[in-house]
Amino acid sequence: METVLELDNEEQITSGKTQEEGKEEDDLDLTAPTQALSERSTASAPQEPFLNQEASKLYPESYRLNSPGEIRLFSIAENFQRQYSYLYPDRKPLLLCPANECGVKKFVPTTLQPTPTIHPELYTWEGCASFVADFLSLEMLDPPVDLPRRLLSSASVLQSQSATSFEFATLLCSLLLAAHYDAYCVSGYAVRETCLLDQSLQECPLLGTEVKVSAKQITKYSLKAVREVKSRFLDNELKKKQDAEAALLQKHKLQESSEQRPADPLQGLRVHCWVLVLSGSRDVRKNFFIDGLTGNSYATDDDSFLGIESVWNNFNYFVNMQDCSRGCADTVYDLDDLHLWEPVLYGATSKKQLIRDVLKRKEAKEVEKEGEEEEVEKEELPPPRDFGMFTSWVSSISISKKDLETRWPGGQKATRYRKANLERFAPYVRPDGLATRLTTYRDLDCTEAVSVKESFQNRGDQLEQKEVSGADGSTTEHFRRGRRLQLLCESTSCSALVYCIVMRTRCFSFRSDLRQTDRECVMEFSDMRVDGLLRRVESSAEMTETFEGRKDFLRYRHVVFDQKNQLQIQKVVERFHRNGSTPANRDVAERVFLLAERRVEVTYHLEDFRFIPSKTSFIKPTESTEKEKAGLFGPDMASVFQVDPSKKPPHILPLYVMLQDLMKDEEKVILQIHESKKEVRGILACRRQEDTDIELVFSPWTTAGAARARLQRQERERLTAEEEKWLQEKEKDILAPFLQQLDGNKTLSGKDAKKLYQDCLEDFRKGLEKHCGLIQERYDKETQELQKEQQRYRKNQLTVTKEQEEEYQAYYAEKTFLIKVIKTRLNMHKKAAPQQLYHLDQKLKQDPRLSRHLL
């Protein structure tokens, strides 16, 4: 099949046809069946506008009209469609010129609009694919075996957040082209699950994820790893067992899928659109597919894709001429091979050709800079292309930061997987900060829930993950760093409720019940605690604590409580690390306080070349009571075992001193145990309070956080303005300080009103007298200073120099003027004081709060 070349003159275009096309139609002698095929074509079928005339005016002119160049492209595509339908009547028509929002037909490559973005999340294909899959909701093709009648622009799709698979691929391809990937939209056929976005037979990506440890980089200076000795027979047996289990699991999955999924009657006919990324750019070493509906990547031979009709980018449109009876496994993606791919625009430029042109021009410039006289032949540069793609008619793609944060339509999206359902929420959409909820089920119909795993963001209590098990009703909670008391993990267990609080990567079950019996609490702490506590396991009958980094070398403590009275301690076991500064036969390794038996047992660390440790056992003497005296310590109350028989046994006095120290340590240990139980109760109460009052932490770097901060700032400004206004009103109110003395009573009695009247006048009179006294005091002070200076001058008048006399004259003039001003102010104040007092009296009598009581 020959492609259509560039038309000679645009003036020859009449009614969408050219003279050449007319000749070709006459030569081909298109009969009625061929015309029917042409009418069936999507590109040439008559389209009605999807918007009314008033709504169409809201779009740019490029949406509503076709430029002469676009008319030219449309004519070429129409002629190509007619020849294609005539030569390949068994193949479906191509998607060449679908209608846009305004009902105007546009050439498909011009719908792609590569627009650079400022968001780092969209710099890679993973980020682009994830955003498109999350941001848009699928609109099914109707019927599913035909190409869509319209193809909306990416700008409109971003506004509506609803798109077909073709619009998914168009938006994704535009983003990838802007990120400098060699991407193409692919029109072809796929299986039912891919076309309908049915992932109910696929494993959820959040299930069974394992942390991949990166391989350690080996250099020539690295130490060679020690060869691990293994049994080949055991390895083969283990591999056979694993292969058998995997085969059995795959068989069960196939049986379940065959039972649930009947055969698709439209197998191989369902139309689908996805994205092809070719190798050679952005370090892409191998071609791969991207399904815009899921955002996942697939190999080009994946069974989900059954065939390819055509591919296109923003430069050209290519028709696949290869056999796809075996799917896409044997497809070769060399678009420059005209035997495999037929271009609509023959001789048009491409991205690879543009790169080659740029490289050749750079080489030519480098040759000129080197000063070589040889002239660069123009034949080496690529000749001008016969036809070039026109600028896209689509408006620039605008993705805001809010779109990236909101992500899903309406802020949430649910996806069903095999025996699982995944719900995702945008930040701050849920009041509890819920980000994802993964529910796993026992059956494929998703009727019997097994577990619910929830993840949270921006929680004030640092809650990060919660998992609820349907089998025993247990709940597991994980937290980030930042908990109080340096808590890393808290866990309590019983038959009713399970909690787990994890601050790092470790996870432990935490179970609690309203009953106090059969309750177990496990907590882990960071190494920032002063007491060195790392882990605590507390139940109704026992408590175990693990320590690290203590000065007394304590590393373990186990407590046994009475079954009837949980506050009564029966036994305490403590173990210690080795203290190198103390001999082994005197360094305590373990000590046991048997409170119920009134005994203390001490075990020391092993000595060198010894297999049995030394031990000492004590029986505590009885304590004094009202009826009996305290018991005496005797030799029969201490038992000493020494490994070295040559050493003399200790005397009674050192043993008694040791027992006294042990009894003091026992009292301290008992106090510490009670403090530990109190701390456990406090942590549990704190968790209950945090679950009741959930607070979210709004980050100012997010749109929601910025909006909230703006509202809070406006509210603070409003409250500040109101407070300032209230203070100003209070300052103007002369009765405000006197009303505060009445304990805030709003209604005034006659007695109180008269008292307020008299107190206010008296206070104002005292203020006038005080002010008058201050002025008089200042007048007397300045007068006395002037008199002292006059006396000093008269006394030394005969010996005064001319400069000193001038200084005195200046000082005298300044002081005289100041005294005159003060005297004037004093006279003015004495004259104005009665008038001010009179005005205040009239103001108080006219005050509505006092007037009715003073008349």
Image: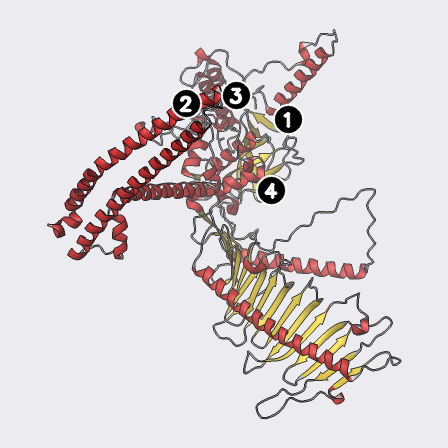
Q: Are marks 4 and 1 in contact (CB under 8 Å)?
A: no
Of the 4 image quadrants, the one containing the N terminus is top right
Residue 58 placement: quadrant: top left
The answer to whether 570 is drawn above or below residue 705 in the figure is below
Residue type at mark 2: give it: Gln
Q: Earlier in the sequence, mark 3 or mark 4?
A: 4
Image point (23%, 51%), residue name: 759
The residues tagged by marks 1 and 2 sit, at their Cα atoms, a distance apart of: 112 Å
Residue type at mark 3: give it: Met
Residue nearest the viewer, comparing 562 with 801: 801
Q: Secondary structure at mark 4?
A: strand
Q: Residues within 10 Å of mark 3 (few under 14, many from 20)?
A: some
| Residue identified by numbered label 3 | 389
| Residue identified by numbered label 1 | 337
Q: Is residue 544 visible in the rendered structure shown here?
A: yes
Image point (37%, 36%), residue name: 781
Could you tell me residue 450's position as x and y percent?
52, 63
Q: Residues within 10 Å of mark 4 (few under 14, many from 20)?
A: some
Q: Earlier in the sequence, mark 4 or mark 1?
A: 4
Residue type at mark 1: give it: Asp
Could you tell me residue 788's position as x and y percent?
41, 33
The residues tagged by marks 4 and 1 sit, at their Cα atoms, a distance apart of: 24 Å
Residue 669 placement: quadrant: bottom right
Image point (61%, 67%), residue name: 536
Q: Earlier in the sequence, mark 2 or mark 3?
A: 3
| Residue identified by numbered label 4 | 298
Residue type at mark 4: give it: Tyr
